[in-house]
């Protein structure tokens, strides 16, 4: 049961989406719990959406806005949002609302048996290029790390705030979605999945498939892979030493 909830919305140039996002998050969030907060992290927007967020916050007591003085990309923005969130559960969704907010309600009962509930897109609607890229990326994550989830990067992740005490997030880019799940999986947290209807953005432009973003994602994936290999080797050495000590004592 969710007794309190923090929405976290990373935002960069979402002036055409923000008002609807805040309105629907407030309406749906209050149907879950009266102990609600909505955290919007403005990643140095240039279209006036930061100023709009401040105006909305003056009218909505559930809304808090955090501003970045310089652009830090998705990873940096989410880390700021997660640090600012104070409630028992955190729900991260993109500011352009890739789902119907009502659909989030179906994920709430799943928290009784899971520490993280993540969405996967039952329909794509992003064009062939994005679909192929996403398919390849999900298979790569599964191959390299054994994380068997359908849609690593989908921006619907509902998780206990306590999870953040056990995971270490370093990514400044789009790899943070995978990093959160991989760290949680490595720490033994329970992950559940729910299918959702995906809605392409109604306003604004996504930059998440740009060559620079993809290159940074792959660099961070490689860094994590090297770190993960070291973790596994280190864990194996610790177990070996413990086993040998046990043999000596026996």
Image: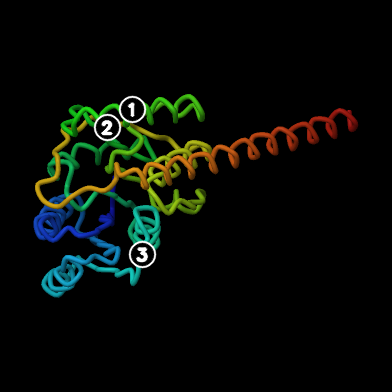
Judging by the rendered image, the residue that carries numbered circle 2 is 120
Q: Which mark is residue 150?
A: 1
- Residues tagged 1 and 2 counted as in contact (Cβ below 8 A): yes
The residue that appears at 31% across and 43% down in the rendered structure is 157
Q: Which quarter of the picture shows residue 116?
A: top left
- The foreground one among 94 and 119 is 94
- The foreground one among 196 and 36 is 196
Q: Residues within 10 Å of mark 1 (few under 14, many from 20)?
A: some
Q: Secondary structure at mark 1?
A: loop
Q: Earlier in the sequence, mark 1 or mark 2?
A: 2
The residue that appears at 64% across and 34% down in the rendered structure is 232
Q: Which mark is residue 84?
A: 3
Image location (x, y in percent) of residue 49: 17, 65
Q: Residues within 10 Å of mark 3 (few under 14, many from 20)?
A: some
Q: Secondary structure at mark 2?
A: strand
Q: Earlier in the sequence, mark 2 or mark 3?
A: 3
Q: Secondary structure at mark 3?
A: helix
Image location (x, y in percent) of residue 175: 41, 44
The residue that appears at 45% across and 43% down in the rendered structure is 179
Q: Residues within 10 Å of mark 2 (few under 14, many from 20)?
A: many
Q: Which quarter of the picture shows residue 55?
A: bottom left
């Amino acid at each position: 049961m969710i007794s309190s909830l923090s929405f976290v919305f990373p935002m960069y140039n979402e002036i055409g989406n923000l008002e609807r996002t805040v309105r629907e998050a407030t309406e749906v969030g209050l149907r879950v719990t009266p102990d609600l907060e909505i955290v919007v992290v403005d990643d140095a927007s240039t279209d006036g959406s930061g100023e709009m967020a401040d105006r909305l916050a003056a009218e909505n007591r559930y809304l808090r806005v955090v501003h970045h003085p310089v652009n830090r990309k998705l990873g940096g923005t989410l880390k700021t949002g997660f640090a600012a969130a104070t409630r028992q559960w955190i729900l991260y969704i993109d500011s352009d609302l890739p789902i119907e907010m009502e659909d989030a309600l179906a994920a709430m009962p799943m928290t009784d048996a899971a520490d993280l509930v993540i969405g996967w897109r039952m329909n794509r609607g992003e064009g062939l290029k994005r679909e192929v890229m996403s398919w390849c990326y999900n298979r790569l994550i599964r191959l390299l790390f054994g994380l068997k989830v359908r849609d690593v990067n989908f921006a619907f992740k509902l998780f206990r705030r306590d999870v953040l005490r056990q995971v270490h997030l370093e990514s400044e880019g789009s790899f943070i979605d995978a990093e959160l799940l991989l760290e949680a999986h490595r720490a033994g947290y329970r992950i559940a999945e729910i299918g959702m209807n995906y809605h392409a953005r109604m306003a604004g432009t996504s930059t998440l498939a740009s060559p620079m973003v993809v290159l940074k994602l792959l660099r961070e994936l490689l860094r994590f892979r090297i770190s993960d290999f070291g973790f596994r080797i280190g864990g194996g050495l610790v177990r070996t030493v413990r086993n040998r000590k046990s043999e000596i004592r026996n």
